[in-house]
Image (cartoon, coloured by chain):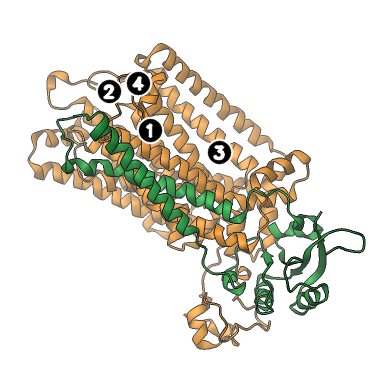
Chain colours: A orange, B green
Amino acid sequence: MDGTTTVPDVIESEASASVEKPLARVPLVLNKRNFSWITERISGVIEERAPRWWWVAFAITSMVATFGLFCLGYQISTGVGTWGLNHPVGWAWDITNFVFWIGIGHAGTLISAILFLLRQKWRTSINRSAEAMTLFAVICAAIFPGVHVGRVWMAWYLAPLPNNYGIWPNFRSPLLWDVFAVSTYFSVSVLFWYTGLVPDLATLRDRATTKIKKFLYGIFALGWRGSNRNWRHYEMAYLLLAGLSTPLVLSVHSVVSFDFATSIIPTWHTTIFPPYFVAGAIFGGFAMVLTLLIPARAIYKLHDIITPQHVDKMAKIILLTGSIVGYAYAMEFFVAWYSGNQYEKFAFYNRIFGPYWWYWWVGMLFCNTLSPQLFWFKRFRQNVYVVYFVCMCVNAGMWFERFIIIVGGLHRDFLPSSWGMFYPTWVDIWTFIGTFGIFTSLFLLFIRYLPMIAMSEVKIVLPEANPHHAFPGEHHTVAAGGKERT
Amino acid sequence: MRTPSGNKVYGMGAEYPSATALYEAAKRVRDAGFKRWDVHSPFPIHGMDEAMGLGKSWLSAVVLAGGTTGLLTAAVLEFGPSWLIYPLIVHGKPTNWATVPAFFPIMFELTILFSAFSAFFAMLLMNGLPRWYHPVFNWQRFSRATNDGFFLVIEARDPRFTELEARELLEQSGGQHVTIIHED
């Protein structure tokens, strides 16, 4: 609360009301970089020739993606039996992958919307790439429910349209809610992302050196010229999109969890699922954001923009959400015991000691519950290798968690006569690996052709972006009695 | 208004060294009574709306209308088929008021969906975007408006606009590179 003395000519009463006091904080952009440095640094990533590592990485990921698409084609043309689904395990890797990918998307929206509403300025360095990650993750997620219906040419049954007998879909089914939730989520995320991109596309347009670039960036920049009459509506639209995305992101994974929670399968039929799933989604998503950004930062030398402070804060969010998830796991066990329901009790016993025991011990216990606890210590939050290790644990752990919930619930339910196991086929495995190929290919294309950091937003967090900011030794006053209310 | 060479004049622009300078200049132009003018900056400047004498953006009203439309659309979409056209009894759930909450998730989603689209398109509409050609792009220096430049442009259409007065105001408020911008 000190530091006001550096602004001597600001009237004290007004200063406390209107001027942001310069607290002794670690700056969000290090080394006193200026506006044009930010433009140069971030646009430079796109404007330089594609480095060799990029081509190698893109060749590999696009090959994996192509093989994944081949697997999808094979599954569609041959039938859903190419997957290892059976009775009683009618949902396995397909829905696990769906929940896994859609959950990853949630961190992007949390960063772009919720942290925006909470005025967390550090989000500006990471929101663009996190939102891109959201879109790509949702694309990967959408593949699975679309394809697992078996006859994909009947997928239009998901749409709110009457079929040939005039029967409409059941609007009270969580599966239909899911269709609405996921498609709304994707559409709103695209709008939010693109709205944020427009000023940066204008920057790229104004820097473009070739006609084609100028034309393409120009088209998508919509003729943006940084006018304040435009910023005024733009900022309102951005704020409202953030406000709309905030309940939306909480609703999406809640609705996904309803797919399970409204059934009667032991371990699925619980009221804890919506918050438990949302926390898990943000947990897994932040791990994926760091998984992508730590290498990107190292390769493109963006340490002044994505600073240790950013990694530290994301690690703290992983710790928080990881602990919520750990609490939810514990509460599931408690409720199973306390309910006295023999099927619930057995299902949770089976989770730890049943045939899928190691999924629980490694995935849920070690990866999700224990590994993030390292982030209680600053030493570990500031060590990139430890952070990366924990993120990798969380990435894997969250996939295992969804698998345990889905297959663990299905494979041994009420009647021992209908117990079974799930064994993935090569199509299962390669479709999943293929979605990683799609995801990373899209992300690589994104960092090549679009600014991976929101330039116009990072510029706002520089001290000189604030018009009420006074440089030492410069005569600047906030007009007393002026009309401005800031 | 035309220049001696016959070009139609769009207005007069000046560049300012910092966000603070632009902010102060905007207040002076506002107080001088100009109406058709604008400032351009690489990022939104805090408090600039007030410095320019602009009020709150009523984009929010459009979004409210959009959201309401979404909610009603969902209600019609759900209750129409499920209650009137082809009532479905699934899991023995009746079609009465007790089951209405099961319709809420889709109502919520469509409210958000319609609101978001109205926010986006209202933003474009109220800003007159997309507009790929604009006279300010004729000004060489203006390309810095998306990098690190701060600009103020007074339009020639403004009733108070005279070349002399505008130039004096821009120069006195600390504007550099004061330039006449051509329409074409």
Say which of marks 2 and 4 sits in front: 2
The amino acid marked with disc number 4 is: Pro
Q: CA distance from mark 1 to mark 3?
A: 19 Å
Residue type at tag 2: Gly
The answer to which quarter of the image holds residue B105 is top left
Identified at 80% across, 55% down, the residue is B138
Mark 2 or mark 4: whose residue is earlier in sequence: 2
Q: Is residue B3 left or right of residue A29?
A: right
Q: Which residue is mark 4?
A: A424
Q: Residue at x 34, y 26 (%)?
A: A162
Q: Nearer the viewer, residue A48 or B164?
A: B164
Tag 1–tag 4 contact (CB < 8 Å): no
Q: Chain of mark 3?
A: A
The image shows residue A301, relative to residue A469, as above or below, that is: above
Secondary structure of residue under mark 1:
helix
Residue B27 coordinates in the image, percent (x, y):
65, 77
Q: CA distance from mark 2 to mark 4?
A: 12 Å
The numbered mark, 1 or 3, whose residue comes first in the sequence reads: 1
Tags 1 and 3 touching, CB below 8 Å = no
Would you call the spot at circle 2 few (<14 residues within 10 Å), some (14-19), or many (20 or more)? Answer: some
**Kind of element beneath mark 4:** loop
Circles 2 and 4 on the same subunit: yes
Find disc 1 in the rendering and name its residue.
A98
